[in-house]
Image (cartoon, grey):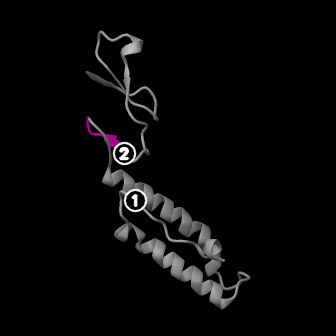
């Protein structure tokens, strides 16, 4: 059998003599952080961690405004954002790569 990657969402298996009706379709790719090990999709730890760091960095960037003293929020709200941002910074060291559960932002809690 030969591994043929036809699209980013499905993997197709076929040998050289297969007709289109004989092609076996595997399960959908769970994410771009997964690799096919020959029988199932498995998380690629380096790629997953890179994706997590990229998302974390974007979330930190978009919450920078809450740290500016002139931004119109209370000190209590600012402290909640500080805690959230620290949770984001710690996230890559504590995350379960198979099932990442992101911290809730203060906006989601309010």
Q: Is residue 47 magenta?
A: no
Considering only vertical position in the picture, is 106 above or below 95? below
Q: Could you tell me which residue is drawn at 43 percent across and 61 percent down?
A: 53
The quadrant of the rendering that contains the C terminus is: bottom right
Q: Secondary structure at mark 2?
A: strand
Mark 2 or mark 1, earlier in chain: 2
What span is colored magenta in the figure?
Answer: 34-38
Compared across the picture, whether 93 is left or right of 80 comes to left
Q: Are marks 2 and 1 in contact (CB under 8 Å)?
A: no
Q: Which residue is mark 2?
A: 34
Q: Residues within 10 Å of mark 1 (few under 14, many from 20)?
A: few
Q: Which mark is residue 25?
A: none
Viewer-proximal residue, 61 or 22? Answer: 22
Q: Which residue is mark 1?
A: 99
Compared across the picture, whether 56 is left or right of 25 comes to right
Q: Could you tell me which residue is drawn at 43 percent across and 32 percent down?
A: 10
The quadrant of the rendering that contains the N terminus is: top left
Q: Residues within 10 Å of mark 2 (few under 14, many from 20)?
A: some
Q: Nearer the viewer, mark 2 or mark 1?
A: 1
Q: Could you tell me which residue is drawn at 60 percent across and 71 percent down?
A: 63
- Image coordinates for residue 86, horizontal then vertical, percent: 47, 78
Viewer-proximal residue, 39 or 16? Answer: 39
- Image coordinates for residue 9, horizontal then vertical, percent: 46, 35
Viewer-proximal residue, 98 or 81? Answer: 98
Q: Quadrant of residue 18?
A: top left
Viewer-proximal residue, 29 or 62? Answer: 29
Residue most extreme to the right: 72
- Image coordinates for residue 82, horizontal then vertical, percent: 55, 82
């Amino acid at each position: 059998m030969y591994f043929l990657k036809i699209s980013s969402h499905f993997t197709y298996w076929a040998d050289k003599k297969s007709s289109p009706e004989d092609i076996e379709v595997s399960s959908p790719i769970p994410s771009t952080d997964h690799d096919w090990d020959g029988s199932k999709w498995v998380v690629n730890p380096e790629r997953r961690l890179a994706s997590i760091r990229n998302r974390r960095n974007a979330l930190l960037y978009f919450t920078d405004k809450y740290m500016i003293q002139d931004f119109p929020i209370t000190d209590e709200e600012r402290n909640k954002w500080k805690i959230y941002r620290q949770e984001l910074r710690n996230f890559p060291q504590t995350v379960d790569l198979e099932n990442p559960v992101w911290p809730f932002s203060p906006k989601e809690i309010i």
